[in-house]
Amino acid sequence: SFFFDQNGQASFGVKQPEETRHNEFMRQFEEDKKAALAGKYEFIGMNQILDHPFGCKDRVVTETDYIPQRQLSFFAGISNEYGYDRIFDWLEYSKTELPLMCGILKELPEPESPKKTVYVMHMPPAGLRLGQLLYQDLDIGSVDIYEFLKAKQPLLSLHGHIHESPDTEKGSW
C-alpha cells in the first residue's frame, strides 16, 4: 500500500489508521483527477492512451492526424458491466467514435501553480523518444500531450506505457 502522512511524505506498508485516509485520498483523486500534497505540490493525472494493437480499448482516444496501428485481434472490446462490447470494425470506429486527446487534456483541472504541478500521464509525449518502440523505428508518443506540456510548463511530468525505450539503439535515458 502507498500512503501520505500529514506532512505529505509518501510511505509504503500497512498502516491501519492511515488506510482510511489513503482510500479517501485515492477516491478524491479518481473523482477530481487532482490531488495536493501538504500544500506544496499538485498532482494531476490522466490515464487515456492512443490506440494500441491489443484488443481491450477501454482507455483509448485518438488525435487529429493519428494513424491507427495494425490490430493483433480480430475484434476490439470496450468493457461494460457484463464483459465486453465487441467492435469488429475497429478502424472505422476509431476514426468516428473516439474522443480526441486534446479534448481530454482540456478537461483536466487547472493547476493553482504550474511551477508546483506534477502531471502523471500514462501516455508519453511525442518527439522525446519516450515512446520509442524496440521492434521498429516508431515513436508512439502523443503530439497533443507534448503540446499540452509545452504550453503548461509544469514542474515535472511522469509517464509510463512504454517499457522498451532504454533498450533501443536510438533511444536514450
Image (cartoon, rainbow, N blue to C red):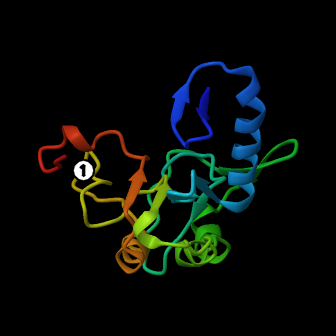
User: Would you place residue 18 above or below residue 96 in this image?
Assistant: above
Give percent across and percent down for residue 167. Answer: 20, 37
Picture quarter with the N terminus: top right
Q: Residue at x 64, y 77 (%)?
A: 96
Q: Nearer the viewer, residue 163 or 154?
A: 154
Residue 18, position in %: x, y?
71, 30
Image quadrant where residue 152 sits: bottom left
Closer to the camera, 111 or 17?
A: 17
Q: Residue 51: in sight, yes or no? A: no
Image-based side of 151 in relation to 29, left or right: left
Does the rendering let one see residue 123? Answer: yes
Farthest residue in the left direction?
169
Q: Categorize mark 1 by other alpha carbons within 10 Å: few (<14), some (14-19), many (20+).
A: few
Coordinates of residue 54 in the picture (x, y in percent) = 53, 46
Question: Which residue is at a point 37% across and 73% down the rendered structure image?
Answer: 153
Circle 1 residue: 136
Q: Nearer the viewer, residue 91 or 148?
A: 148
**Quadrant of residue 144 within the rendered picture:** bottom left
Identify the residue shown where x is 68% and y is 73%.
97
Residue 73's place in the image compared with 140, above or below, is above
Indicate the quadrant where residue 110 lies.
Answer: bottom right
Q: The residue tagged with tag 1: helix, strand or loop? A: loop
- Residue 111 in the image, given as x and y percentages of width and height: 55, 71
Using the image, determine if residue 51 lies above or below residue 96. above
Position of 102 with respect to 77 (left or right) is left
On screen, residue 120 versus residue 126, left or right, reads right
User: In this view of the protein, which residue sits in the foreground, 102 or 69?
Assistant: 102
What amino acid is labelled 1 in the image? Gln
| Outermost right residue | 82
How many numbered marks, from 0 up?
Answer: 1
